Structure formats: C-alpha cells, structure tokens
Image (tube, coloured by chain):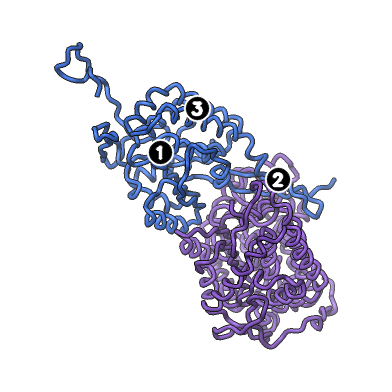
Chain colours: A blue, B purple
Amino acid sequence: MSKAERPGGREPVRLAVRKTYKLYIGGAFPRSESGRSYVVTSSKGEFLANASKASRKDARDAVSAARKAFGGWSGATPYNRGQILYRVAEMLESRRAQFVAELTDAGTRKAGEVVDAAVDRLVWYAGWADKIAAVAGSTNPVAGPYFNVSSPEPTGVVAVVAPDEPLLGLVSVIAPVIVTGNTCVVIAGERAPLPAITLAEVLATSDLPGGVVNILTGSVKEIAPWLAAHMDVNAIDLTGVTDPDLAVACEEGAAENLKRVLRPAATDWSADPGTKRLTVFLETKTVWHPTGV
Amino acid sequence: MFEYAPAPESRDVVDIKPSYGLFIGGEFADGTGTSLKTVNPASEEVLAEVAVASADDVDRAVRAAREAFGTWSAMPGSERAKYLFRIARIIQERSRELAVLETLDNGKPIRESRDVDLPLVAAHFFYYAGWADKLQHAGYGADPRPLGVAGQVIPWNFPLLMLAWKIAPALAAGNTVVLKPAETTPLTALLFAEICRQADLPPGVVNIVTGAGETGAALVNHPDVNKVAFTGSTEVGRLIGRSVAGTDKKVTLELGGKAANIVFDDAALDQAVEGIVNGIFFNQGHVCCAGSRLLVQESIAEELLDALKRRLGTLRLGDPLDKNTDIGAINSAAQLAKIRELSDLGEAEGAERWSPVCPLPDKGFWFPPTIFTGVAQSHRIAREEVFGPVLSVLTFRTPAEAVEKANNTPFGLSAGVWTEKGSRILWMADRLRAGVVWANTFNKFDPTSPFGGYKESGYGREGGRHGLEAYLDV
C-alpha cells in the first residue's frame, strides 16, 4: 500500500483506485462465472489482490473463444502475426515500471532485467512468424511426375499450464504457441498470477484479436485436468505442472483425443529458447499434385 | 467387359516353413506363449504356425536391442548407411518372393504387392540409408543423438511396407528396434529377419517378436523402451497414449482416417473416377488414408456416380495371386465381420447400398466393392473408419461447404481434391485439416514425402526429413 492510502497520514488523503484482477477470455475481462476469488499475497505475505478463481465453465468458455479465434488468427499472414507480436513487445516495454513493481511484489530478483528479457523474448519470437515455414517445411523430390511440398501448420487450440515464473516464463510459453497461428488457453502460475492479468491488458491493447490468448487464474490442480480432457483442445503444454501425479493424470486425459503433449521439464527461462516450443505445436501438411501439360 | 484367362503368379518362389520362432539377438528362438496360426485369407489355408512372444520373450528382445545399441549407435553413420543399402538391395533381389509371400499372407492383389508395396519398401531403406551419415545436416542440431531402443508395432494392411517405414529411419538414426508385426500377417517380417542375417546386420539391432495385442502391450509398456512407434487403430492409439503417460518415452502414432475425396464440377471426370476407385478400393480399402467419403459437387453427382458404377462393373475380384485381380481378399474373418456390421448399419440408418454384380469365391474372406448414396454426415458409415471397400457418397454445393464437411470428422489423415482450377486447389489445400492432401491424384506415397495425421489420426510424421525427428533425441 502506498502512503497516500494510509488514513491519518500528513499528506492530503487520496485513496488509490485499485485494479480488480479478472480473467481474460475472448478479448474481454470477465470475473469467474463461479463468483470465486482467492487471495494473492506478496512474497512477504502482504495482501495484494483478490484474483479470480476460474472454474471448469470458465475453462470451457475460454476454449470456445480460442476455437472461434483460430480461423482468423491461423489465416492471418505470418507478416501480420509478426507485426502484432512485435506490438505486444512494444506495449510491454511501455508498461515496464508496472511489471517491475508487480514482479518485485512477487519476489522476483532483478525484476527490471527480467522484464527486459521478456520484451526481448517477444521480439525474438515475433521474428519467427514469417521464417518458421521456410525452416520446418520442405519440397520433397518424389520419384514421379508430382509437385510435392510440406509446410507446417498450427495444430489448433493449445492449453498451456504456465510455469511459476510470472512474466518471463509466461511470455516464453505463450509467444511460441501463438506466433505460428495457434490460439491458446493459459492457466497462469497460481502463486503470482497478477503479472499474467497485466500481460492480458498488454495483449488487449496490441491488436491481438480477442480469443487468441485467453488467461485463467486459479487452481492449476482444479482446471488443468478439464483442459487436458477437453475434446476441442488439440494440444497441451504441461510445463507449469509441478505435481508428477497431476502431470500423469493430464497426459492420460490428453490421450482421449490424441492431444499433442509437451511434458513438464525444468527450464532455464533466461537461456536461448531454441525452436522446440515453436515446432512441437505444428502439424506438417504435405500436398501432392501431378505435373504435366 | 473383357474376359481374361487365369494368370496366376507362381507361388513356387516362396518357401514357407511349417513353423516360425521369434527373431531375438540375431537368432530364431521359440516363443513361450501358445503359438498362433497365420492363414491365407483368400483360401483359409493355414500357411504356418508362428510363435507368440510372452512378456518374458519381449524382455529378452528388448535386452538384446539394448545390448546392440551401444555399438550400433557408436558406429560411424557411413557404416550404418552401408548396412541399410545392403538391406535395400537384398529386398530388391528377393522382391518377387516377398511380394508373393505378402499376397499369400495378407490377401492383397499381387499387382499391388509387386508394383506398389515392394518398390516402396526398397526405396524406403535406400532413402534412409542416405540419411545415416548426414544427420548433422538434417536441421536437428550439430550432433543429433538416437533415442535408444525403439518398440514398434505395425498393422496388417501393408505388413512389409509398415516395417520399412518403422525400421529404416530408426536404424539410420542409430537406434535399435524390437518390432511386432500384426498377428495375421507376420510372414514377411520373419523373412525380413532372414534378410537381416544375409546382410550380416549385427545381432540385436533388429528383433522381431510375433504375437497379438498382449505382446504389443508388453513391448509398448516395457520400461527400457525409449521410443514407441505405432500404426493402427485410433482405439489402440488412445491406450498407448495413456500407458506412456508420465514416462520419458517418445511416441509417434499413425492412426485411423475418414478421408474426404472432393470432386468439383470442373474436374476431369474420368481421371476423378480412377482416383476415387484407387482411393477406396486400393488394397480392399484396408488403408488408413483411404478416400472413404466421396464429396461430389451436386451438379455433377449423377453423372459422376453413373461413371463410377460403370467403372466398378469392370473391377475383377478374386484370386489375389492372379495378375489381373483388382480386389483381393479381406484380411481376416474379424475384419470381414466389422465391414459387414458397419455396412448393414449403413442400410439400417437409411443410406442406399449398391454393389456391382460380383460373384464371390466360396472359400476365404471377401466383400464386394460397395457404394452408399444418400449418406448423411451423422451416419456411422460417414463417421467411422470401415477399413474396407465401402464408399460413402455425400454432396455439396459450395467450396466452403465442401471444406466444412470434409473437416467434420475427428480424424485428419488425408484428403483429395479434384478440380482443374489451380487457385481452388490451393485454397482447399490450405483449409483441409489433414496431413496429406492429394490434388488430382490419390494414395500416392514416397519415402521423401512426410506422412501422418492431424487430430485423432495421431501425431508425428513418417518419411522425408521430418521422419527422422521421431527417432532423434530432439
């Protein structure tokens, strides 16, 4: 709490207008339909906010929004997607101070450097939008009079369990998923979800179509299995699942409709990310056509 | 219609033993399970007794593969390549023998096993042989490493070709394998084991364990298997997806399909008819990427169906070893029962059934080429994989409707588009959610061309540079 909020202070009293941290679904900021919230505290244990505690219904709404956004986003030109991701980086940079404050509250050390790294990560992925197809695609020299070409395509709706690295980790799992044309439903890290909602505000002001990224806050253990078993979700990134039993349950649920699964793995978010997170949520489509006159 | 004199391929080129064991560590050994019989589906004659691998046998095979992995993975890629080239050559040398054996065990026409399966099998080994010493240039890092022991389970529709798709890239990348062929078609895999011996392949690099589902489950669930590759039904794919949860096993699954073959009003009709026939009646429709849903533009539906029915009247069903046979035997009694059940359901749900006059042989498992018209998207014959010579016909008016109907399936393995308009082909290809799109052609395969599905048709690709990824630690 800032000084100005304290009653009885010597300064003229002006009560700060606090932000209600809500969910981000389909480009809007609804509260959880369940009406639930949970207390988020700083690393020192001070009250920060009541975050929305998303329900199964919220998760389903988010999947619907992501599915609805998929056609337009995957059909946008890669150049356009790259521009929008770069715009996200710009917006993030312009809110640097706010993220530094939130990360500091969450106990992140050298928060300024972390925010810078998150901005740079977005820029790095933005540049991949119109390059990944050239790297992951191929023309195939088949033994016959056919033109044959393979190109990567987004797999569809991806559920993402974000790691407990409130900004850099979050950006590092969202950007590679959406830059190739997927849409996603993200469960923010449970302990420090506030930067995720502030990131949603950045996304909402970056020309990113509503529904491309949907962010839920709440209990990972409660929501992740619903997303893992959801029949209209094409893939799931379990990076942020720390409980091995939960990871197994999610992977088993994912088998129901043969989701692509990225298993949890310890990750150094400051390291060069490589292309794995880009390619794991891509399909390869191969087109044949006869040649001739 | 022409009359043809019988023209059977000689079966003297094959020498089928009365019984076969398991191929473990370079030696043939008895299995500890109760052996099974493999039959010729065209005559119901028992071809041979085949050992059934128990969990202990599978364990021995995995241990043999693990033991061989050290030297095989450490061997220079150029040396591994030469083994694979050698195998490719022996397959070419013995290709007629393999083709006849495949036809006997599987029931597919010799024209297909000889002209499609075997050339592709040899080409696949030849192709991946060339990758073995070029892995550092494949786009998977400077020094991509193999995974270890691959457990591979393959289906009965293209027994030797599926073996090639599994074993060639695995070995090229430096893995060793334990492969389980389907219980109804184990013979060409066992002949392949003999080919490995002729090629002096180090013992344990390739191990073949025969058996049914239990053997497959033992292999997939073996804790020392690093990689699982499966081609087969979506139902079993789901089971495998569950059983590998929480392990480090890398998995690729190539599962079912319900491909739409879409014909526009400007398509070259005669070519489209040939494509439709090839799409659904090739290999008796036992093809995961078969064009089992014909989507025809309403304005030409009648004309196309008339031409299609005329063409079906000329298809020759019968002795798979006859060189003039177009449609062979259904692979097993169980599969025939499934095809009959779904076809009967098609009628019961209100679709109209048609088959050409087509006498069926008295012995063996046979099903006539069948077309259903008046099919609704909700009918089970439009939603479920029949895996037989059964075509469901639906119509559409606009390209957008064609896309919507084509994609209205949990599967996403393949699709076909027939139109003379290039821009429409590209527009359609862009929107079809399927791993392979054949435009003005169908059911074409090549080792350089990645193959695999979207959605519930599985994940991972086989073939091409993409096919290496499944066998590398990347």
Residue type pointed to by label 1: Glu
Q: Position of residue B90 (x, y in %)?
A: 80, 70
A205 above or below B152? above
Residue type pointed to by label 2: Ser
- Between circles 1 and 3, the one closer to the viewer is 1
Q: Position of residue B431 (x, y in %)?
A: 61, 44
First of labels 1, 2 by sequence position: 2
Quadrant occupied by the N terminus of chain B: bottom right
Residue type pointed to by label 3: Ala
- Location of residue B13 by image quarter: bottom right
Which chain is mark 3 on? Answer: A
Q: Position of residue B326 (x, y in %)?
A: 76, 70
Residue at image mark 1: A165
First of labels 3, 2 by sequence position: 3
Q: At numbered mark 1, what does the secondary structure look like: helix, strand or loop?
A: loop
Taking depth in this image into account, of A266 and A4 the one nearest to the observer is A266
Using a 10 Å C-alpha cutoff, classify the residue at mark 3 as few (fewer than 14 neighbours), some (14 to 19) or many (20 or more).
many
Which chain is mark 1 on? Answer: A
**Same-chain check, marks 1 and 3:** yes
First of labels 1, 3 by sequence position: 3
Residue at the (39%, 34%) spot, across then down: A196
Per the model, the C-alpha gap separating discs 1 and 3 is: 18 Å
Taking depth in this image into account, of A31 and A152 the one nearest to the observer is A152
Q: Is residue B308 left or right of residue A253?
A: right
Q: Is residue A57 left or right of residue B166?
A: left
Residue at image mark 3: A89
Mark 1 near mark 2, Cβ–Cβ under 8 Å?
Answer: no
